[in-house]
């Protein structure tokens, strides 16, 4: 039953997603995810999973687009099997909250977007700490 539910949720997510994304950077190294429009032209949701040199995990983000710009801001949560990929190394943990400060790069590519993000992170477990990370990604979709 769990496998059937997982397949059903995956198929529904692929059908509702606006964009598919692949990024390199925090929190896990290499992430793949889907971006969903929640409020058209204003708010997106993103789910992602990733694998890195020390961790395997996933998370969700709620992203607010800044009108008339290529900027977006967000807040999300993540959890992994090992320490996340951020600086400083001694304060990192497996799960927590992260802010997302991102921008789209203006490249003349149809249906392809490139973005850069900064991630201030508050680690909640196994210990409380603070870190900063970033990511560069490619997004394909409408």
Image (cartoon, helix red, strand yellow):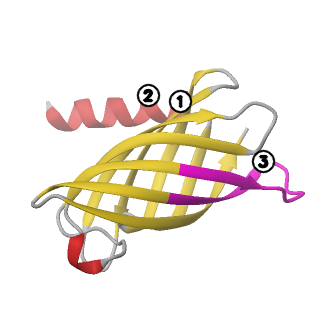
Residue 74 at x, y percent in the picture = 50, 40
CA separation in Å, label 3 and label 1: 17 Å
The image quarter containing residue 122 is: bottom left
Question: What SS does tag 2 mark?
Answer: helix
Q: Main secondary structure of the magenta part?
A: strand
CA separation in Å, label 2 and label 1: 5 Å
Image position of 33 (left or right of 102): left
Q: What residue is disc 2 on?
A: 12
How packed mark 2 is, by other alpha carbons closer than 10 Å (few <14, some 14-19, many 20 or more), is: few
What are the residue bounds of the magenta stretch? 101-118
Q: What residue is rendered at 53% in x and 65% in y?
A: 135
Q: What residue is rendered at 29% in x and 62% in y?
A: 130
Q: What residue is disc 1 on?
A: 15
> Could you tell which of marks 3 and 1 lies nearer the N-terminus?
1
Q: What residue is disc 3 on?
A: 111
Quadrant, the C terminus: top right
Image position of 138 (left or right of 50): right
Q: Identify which residue, 88 or 32, lies in the foreground.
A: 88
Q: What residue is rendered at 50% in x and 66% in y?
A: 134
Q: CB atoms at circles 2 and 1 under 8 Å apart?
A: yes
How packed mark 1 is, by other alpha carbons closer than 10 Å (few <14, some 14-19, many 20 or more), is: few
The image quarter containing residue 113 is: bottom right
Q: Identify which residue, 80 or 33, lies in the foreground.
A: 80
Magenta segment includes 42: no
């Amino acid at each position: 039953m769990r496998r059937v539910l997982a397949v059903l949720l995956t198929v529904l997510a692929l059908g509702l997603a606006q964009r598919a994304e692949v990024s390199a950077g925090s929190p896990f190294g290499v992430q793949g995810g889907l971006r969903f429009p929640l409020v058209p032209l204003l708010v997106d949701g993103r789910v992602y999973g990733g694998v890195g040199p020390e961790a395997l995990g996933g998370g969700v983000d709620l992203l607010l687009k800044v009108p008339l710009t290529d900027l977006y801001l967000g807040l999300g949560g993540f959890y992994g099997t090992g320490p996340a990929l951020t600086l400083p190394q001694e304060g990192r943990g497996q799960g927590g909250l992260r802010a997302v400060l991102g921008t789209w790069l203006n490249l003349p590519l149809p249906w392809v977007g490139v973005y850069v993000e900064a991630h201030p992170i508050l680690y909640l477990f196994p210990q409380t700490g603070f870190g900063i990370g970033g990511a560069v990604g490619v997004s394909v979709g409408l």
